Structures are given as structure tokens and as C-alpha cells.
């Protein structure tokens, strides 16, 4: 008699609970979420790996209360933290695929749907501690704040607007550098923004840049380091090429803390490092100290 391998190896197991191999066991019920309880009460810190209540992160300006690790925060959240009130400018401007780079148009559409932003920077006018100022804030969620033609245009326009209105400029800088999908057009924004910064300075007006994590590439080689006062957040990565690229190029191990905010300050490339929770008060004090008018 021939052995039936198929029947032996692929036969249905008996359901011992029901007593019949033809009656499947009832599916386990999925746990039901309790009414009124938020989906995400706590989050994991990227610095220490500990679980922290979301409310604690929010109350502490996105800084872990257990280890002090600085989370990246969106452009509008930073504006909320530092400004008394804010009116957005150039809100309708959005980037296009100027070089027909494959897949770039789809990427832009996806990011606009996901973030609700037209591009990687939010610009406007508001007040900090009662002092009127023009502001731009770069957003890590939009291609890590990389600078394409729209980002460069909006930042240049912010400086031009501030020069016309006689306002200081505060810039919250975050960027992975020039946007490769726009090629030389992206690199041109370094010259455009630098020219706008220079004209604003020639009008005798103050520019403060706040370097956050990361500030790299063409942005660090242009308007990020052209400010009258350069502030930085604790632990921020700041430089042109990244540390891994430099190590691979020179085939040497870099010093500990290389290109971090503390290293940059020690070498004289940043004026001061400010805790995120003290940023608003520090900016207001510097603006007043340099003669910016307090709004009525």
C-alpha cells in the first residue's frame, strides 16, 4: 500500500477545544481601546531610550526630562515657543520640479500632504518679548530642511521685507544642505540669501541666527554663519561636510564632540549656547540690547 505523504503532512490538526477538526476555534477578540484614553501617552527618548510621558516632552520644550536630549521640533512649534504672536508671509509659495528630476514631484506632493507645509521653511513677522521682528524657521520634516529654490527665495524675501520695514531678523536654522534634486539652482540660493543678508546689514539692522540640529552643507556656508550674533542649541551638529565624510576623506579619527555646538563655540564659530527653555527670553534681551523697538 502506497503511503500518502500529502495526507500525513498536511492534514488539519484536531481542534481539541471544539472536538471536531471541521469546526475552527473562535478567533481571539482584539483588545478594545478604552474610551477617552489617547493613543500615545508616552514616547521613547532617542537619547537615553527611556519611556517619557508625551506631556512631559511638550512641557519641557521637546527636551527629555531624564537625560536632556534635544528632540527635533517642527518649524511652527519653534515659532510658538519663541514668539508672542506671528503673521506668516509668503505662505503660498511652493517649490516645483525645475529640473524634472525623476520622482521629485511625487516626493514634494507626499511631503506636503504629510507635513501640511508647502516647503521646508516658514517665514513671517511677529514679536519676541514684545519686540517686533521678522522670522524664518526651517522644518526638519520637509527633506530635513534642505534648501531648494523656494526655501532660498522665501528666506531672501524675509530679509528684504525686514530691511524695508526696519526690522531685525531671527532665523531658526536647520538643514541638511542644498537640495540635490535642484542641482545648480539649489546652490545659487547660497549667493541669493547672502546678498539679502548683506543688504539687511547695510541698513544697520540686526540678524540673529539660531543653529539647531543639524546645520550643514550649503546653508552653513551661507546665511547660517553670516549673522551678527550666532546662537546654537545644546549638542547640535554644525558643520559643512558630515563627520563620517571627513573621517573617510582624511582617514583619521576625529576628536570627541567634533562639529557639535560646544566644539563650535569653543573654536569661536558660535557666540553662545542657549537652553531651549531660555531661548525666548535670551532672544528678547538681545533684541532690546541692540536697540530693537518694543511694540506698543
Image (cartoon, grey):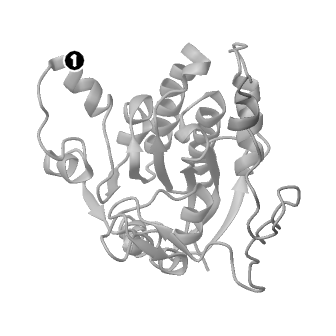
Is 135 left, or right, of 68 in this rendering?
right
The residue positioned farthest toward the front in the image shown: 1
For image coordinates 82% across by 69% down, the residue present is 18
Image coordinates of residue 194 in percent, x first then y, are 46, 32
Could you tell me which quadrant the N terminus lies in?
top right
For image coordinates 54% across by 35% down, the residue present is 146
Question: Few, some or many C-alpha atoms within 10 Å of disc 1 (few <14, some 14-19, many ≥20)?
Answer: few
Whether residue 285 is visible, yes or no, is: yes
Camera-nearest residue between 112 and 229: 112
Image coordinates of residue 80 in percent, x first then y, are 59, 69
Query: Which residue position holds label 1?
Result: 249
User: Quadrant of the rendered structure where residue 289 is?
Assistant: bottom left
Total labels: the figure holds 1
Is 29 left, or right, of 74 in this rendering?
right
Q: Is residue 33 above or below residue 79?
A: below
Image coordinates of residue 121 in percent, x first then y, are 61, 45
Camera-nearest residue between 67 and 163: 67
Camera-nearest residue between 76 and 210: 76
Whether residue 94 is visible, yes or no, is: no
Amino acid at each position: 500500500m502506497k503511503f500518502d505523504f500529502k495526507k500525513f503532512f498536511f492534514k488539519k490538526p484536531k481542534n481539541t477545544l471544539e472536538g471536531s477538526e471541521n469546526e475552527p476555534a473562535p478567533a481571539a477578540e482584539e483588545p478594545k481601546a478604552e474610551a477617552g484614553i489617547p493613543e500615545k501617552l508616552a514616547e521613547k527618548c532617542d537619547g537615553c531610550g527611556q519611556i517619557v510621558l508625551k506631556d512631559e516632552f511638550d512641557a519641557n520644550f521637546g527636551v527629555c526630562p531624564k537625560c536632556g536630549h534635544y528632540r527635533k521640533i517642527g518649524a511652527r512649534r519653534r515659532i510658538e515657543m519663541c514668539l508672542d504672536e506671528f503673521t506668516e508671509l509668503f505662505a503660498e509659495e511652493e517649490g516645483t520640479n525645475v529640473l524634472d528630476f525623476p520622482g521629485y514631484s511625487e516626493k514634494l506632493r507626499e511631503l506636503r500632504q504629510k507635513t501640511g507645509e508647502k516647503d521646508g521653511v516658514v517665514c513671517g513677522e511677529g514679536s519676541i518679548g514684545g519686540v517686533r521682528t521678522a522670522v524664518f524657521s526651517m522644518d526638519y520634516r520637509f527633506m530635513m530642511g534642505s534648501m531648494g529654490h523656494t526655501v532660498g527665495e522665501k528666506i531672501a524675501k524675509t530679509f528684504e521685507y525686514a530691511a524695508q520695514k526696519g526690522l531685525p531678523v531671527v532665523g531658526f536654522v536647520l538643514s541638511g544642505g542644498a537640495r540635490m534634486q535642484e542641482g545648480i539652482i539649489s546652490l545659487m540660493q547660497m549667493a541669493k540669501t547672502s546678498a539679502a543678508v548683506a543688504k539687511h546689514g547695510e541698513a544697520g539692522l540686526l540678524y540673529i541666527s539660531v543653529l539647531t540640529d543639524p546645520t550643514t552643507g550649503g546653508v552653513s556656508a551661507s546665511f547660517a554663519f553670516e549673522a551678527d550674533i550666532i546662537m546654537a542649541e545644546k549638542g547640535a551638529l554644525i558643520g559643512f561636510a558630515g563627520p563620517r565624510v571627513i573621517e573617510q576623506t582624511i582617514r583619521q579619527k576625529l576628536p570627541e564632540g567634533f562639529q557639535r555646538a560646544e566644539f563650535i563655540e569653543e573654536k569661536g564659530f558660535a557666540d553662545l549656547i542657549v537652553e531651549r527653555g531660555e531661548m525666548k527670553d535670551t532672544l528678547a534681551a538681545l533684541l532690546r540690547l541692540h536697540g530693537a523697538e518694543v511694540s506698543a
